[in-house]
Image (spheres, helix red, strand yellow):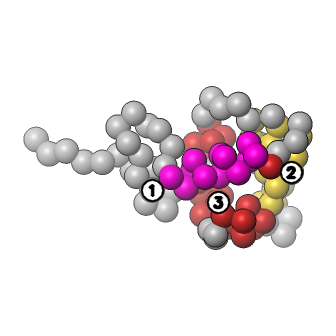
Amino acid sequence: MSTTATTSAVEGDVLDAAGNLSEKQRRILEYLRTNAGTQTYFKSRLIAEDLDLSAKEVGANMRPILDGDFDVTVEKWGYSSGTTWKVTV
């Protein structure tokens, strides 16, 4: 019997056995918590610039945050000149 790490469907980030967020996903979540007011809109490319990631990495790593039970609610809002995320605290 072999053991393998559970991988997310995004950019090869590895999740631990408990299904916790990857390091990139934790950084994005913390960024949203820190920078969101009651309701704020963020573009992936602007989050990416602040976290030294690509916009693609931000978008790919947003799914667990969208699906998770956190103190922020994230909704994919639009795609005009890049993805916009509606974040509600």
Q: Which mark is residue 41?
A: 2
Residues shaded magenta: 23-34
Identity, as a three-letter code, of the amino acid under mark 1: Asp
**Within-10-Å neighbours for mark 2: few <14, some 14–19, many 20+:** some
Earlier-in-chain disc, 1 versus 2 = 1
Give the residue number, with chain letter if any, for mark 3: 58
Q: Secondary structure at mark 3?
A: helix
Q: Is residue 18 above or below residue 11?
A: above
Give the residue number, with chain letter if any, for mark 1: 13
Earlier-in-chain disc, 3 versus 2 = 2
Q: Residue at x 24, y 48 (%)?
A: 4
Q: Position of residue 42 (x, y in %)?
A: 82, 55
Real-space CA distance between mark 1 and mark 2, rounded to the nearest whole angstrom: 25 Å
Q: Position of residue 74 (x, y in %)?
A: 74, 41
Q: Secondary structure at mark 1?
A: loop
Q: Which mark is residue 5?
A: none
Identity, as a three-letter code, of the amino acid under mark 3: Val
Identity, as a three-letter code, of the amino acid under mark 2: Tyr
Real-space CA distance between mark 1 and mark 3, rounded to the nearest whole angstrom: 12 Å
Q: Position of residue 41 (x, y in %)?
A: 86, 51
- Asked whether 5 falls inside the magenta stretch, the response is no
